[in-house]
Image (cartoon, helix red, strand yellow):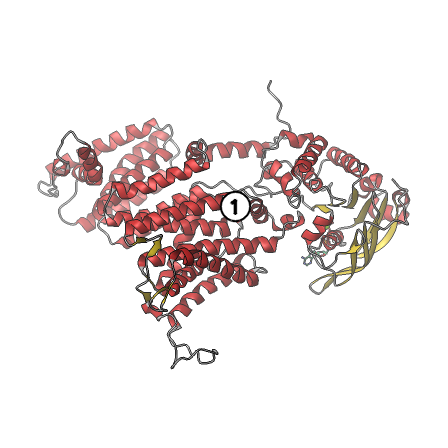
Amino acid sequence: MTEQRIGTDEWVEQHEARLATQSELRELVYGFGEQLPLWGRLGLLLLIGLFVPVLTSNPFHIRIAATIALMATLGVGLNVVVGYAGLLDLGFVAFYGIGAYAYAYLSSDFTGVHLPTLLTIPLITVLGAVVGFLLGLPSLRLVGDYLAIVTLAFGQIFVQLMTSLTRVDLSWVPFLTTDGPVNLTRGPNGIIELDSISIFGFVADTLTENYIIRLVVLILVLLFVHHLNNSRLGRAWRAMREDELAAEAMGMPTRLLKLQAFAIGAAIAALAGTLFAAEQKAVFPANFDVTLLITLYGVVVLGGLGSLPGVLLGAVIMIAVPEILRDIELASLLFYVGSVVALIGLIKPRRLVGLLLLNVAIIGLLVQVIAESIWPDSLAELPSVASVFPEFSVSIRFVTAIIDSLPEIVTSIVRNWLAIPVGNQELIGNIALAILIVLILIASRIKQTTQLLITLVPTMYLLALVWEIRLSGQESVTRLIFVGVVLIVLMIYRPHGLLGTQRIEIV
Amino acid sequence: MNGHDKSATPLLRLTDVNTYYGQIHILQDVNLEVYPGELVCLLGGNASGKSTTLKTILGLVTPASGTVEFAGEEVQHRSTSYRIERGMAVVPENRRIFADMSVDENLQMGAYLRNDKAEIEQDRERVLELFPRLRERLNQLGGTLSGGEQQMLAMGRALMSRPRLILMDEPSMGLAPLLVEQNFQIIREINEQGTTIFMVEQNANMALSIADRGYVLQTGRIVLEDVAENLLQNEQLRKAYLGR
Ligand SMILES: Nc1ncnc2c1ncn2[C@@H]1O[C@H](COP(=O)(O)OP(=O)(O)OP(=O)(O)O)[C@@H](O)[C@H]1O
Ligand SMILES: [Mg+2]
């Protein structure tokens, strides 16, 4: 029986259509994720995480994984404050710092205190919650921009204090005998030689051990926050974020709710701070500056405010991408894969993408032949693709070797395919860049598919050329700009983040 | 319903209430009473202070002087959530549905302060019987409901706290005439089932047709108070609001 849809006006229809087209990525992730119960999802995450040190023993890779785990934990905490409760807290990093410094005071020769880890971690987590609660009190009356400014100031004050509390006069404190001013923080030199985390005699000395601890903590925090979000408290936060007055009119104690969000976020941050300090075995004020805050907001906003899988994805992207971009071959691979993905998104129907790529490949070969015949010896001699290809042998090692050298193989193929000039690279690169920009502008205005495809053929060729001779060898700053541009474009197309839901506003 | 017992304690009583927004004196010596079981409306033009009266009753603003009594208890210094817990509920101006939550979740939010699961479920059934339209769209997001549906949801949400007194701010705002009539029938039904209602309205004709008594507010002062029939006949009010 087809039931008439009573009351579905145009707006409702449109909304559903929009949801259907815009949430493909979300569906892809959640469609799979929803098949699994929570413990299955978290177990999968743990497995994937544990697999990293099995796959690679490269400390560089493990460091990236460990940073991702830590940033994801922080992101989950920030997500409670910003994503769930809707409080724009720019002082969040200070709680992380407080956790780290508290660990330093409780586990180093600097104070002479060496508490067992099983005591420090709960202690510091509670401390974080208390400080978060107290800081929340004066912030209660502030909303929006004002809250942001005050909390930002708090974050800066923390860094300032840690830098400058080097000569503090403590003679007024009763029962304390000091000779002269006391150095409370060692300023920019930081507090060093901290104890490692040690639980039941297991001492986490190595990076890998610390990584696994971070992974476990991340999963516990995820579990906790997931349940929190589905609890009465979580629902009240959502209601408050959407309409504070209405939430209050439903009897929700909005002030208390905000304080709880501050406190829980701060507790998670402080917990992450201890893990950070214990691995670095030192704390410095510079560890807690605004850069970290920006990264963290990137983590939660990129993945979609309020979405836990979004935080994980955001952490992977925000941490891994800049690291990957340090390695020229990896950066190139990412660049090419990204370009093809962009094409797939841009061109409908999708099968035309194959046609386009085929044409681009042919054009490249033609250009090479022509350039070779007009200006002999003007093209750079490159090592052949075969030279980077691993020797074939029937074994699992061959597969890993292929995977390991994939970036090299891909860049080598592309570089051999391109007509790369020997000299004047900079000049030619700049000219190509100028033409490329014009072509992109033209392409962006074309509606008709055939014309678009024809324009995109030279565009793609130039894109590869410009990347190879002009961008890929540049300083990492250029790559960060590149990341920035990618983020901006992403946010234009998905303002609600990769895995976030689109907000609905009553207008 | 007119024969309320004047000797009983009023469910709601405002005595000499003065409310300010900063320096601006809005409510001036407002006195009003609502007895258990009554349906009382508060009429008045734009900016006369109707919403402010409701906010004062709810505790969203605190009066500078005067008392707000609810069920015999002075509550003017109590928090909103305390008053809700005591049995007030509100259908706010412009509905204020939680846009990103489903219809069902919106209803659950109305029962936020309760934890008697079985009875909440019972009340939910009752609300869905009152508004079958809502049952059809339990999983639809609140923000995507039409204006009329949002009004129903706002009323259903208020009922979910099983209130003794429902405060309504302009339930007819922005609705087509047919829907206004339907809505007022439902409001009356809710009242007849035993819930006391205090309703702010600009649509005086409609409001008075279902109300027991009415107050008229003009620039922050109560200028008229009577039973509904008399107000409908009142020359002054007719000229000012009823337009005939
Ligand atoms: N938060 C506020 N700060 C300052 N002035 C306010 C505030 N809220 C309301 N006012 C003013 O108080 C007066 C009464 O407002 P109120 O909302 O009570 O009017 P109302 O009778 O409900 O009008 P309407 O029928 O248009 O909703 C108005 O002049 C309004 O501008
Ligand atoms: Mg009003």
Chain containing mark 1: A
Residue A112 appears in the rendering:
yes
User: Mark 1 is on which residue type?
Assistant: Leu
Q: Residue under label 1, please give it.
A: A228
Q: Quadrant of the N terminus of chain B?
A: top right
Q: Nearer the viewer, residue A231 or A151?
A: A231
Q: Nearer the viewer, residue B202 or A366?
A: B202
Give the image location of residue A433, x and y in percent: 26, 46
Q: What element carries label 1?
A: helix
Residue B241 placement, left or right of B122: right
Q: Which of A104 and B201 is in front in this view?
A: A104
Give the image location of residue A467, x and y in percent: 24, 45
Residue A194 in which image quadrant: bottom left
Residue A152 placement, left or right of A436: right
Few, some or many residues within 10 Å of mark 1 (<14, 14–19, 20+): some
User: In what quadrant does ligand 1 lie?
Assistant: bottom right
Q: In which quarter of the image is the C terminus of chain B?
A: top right
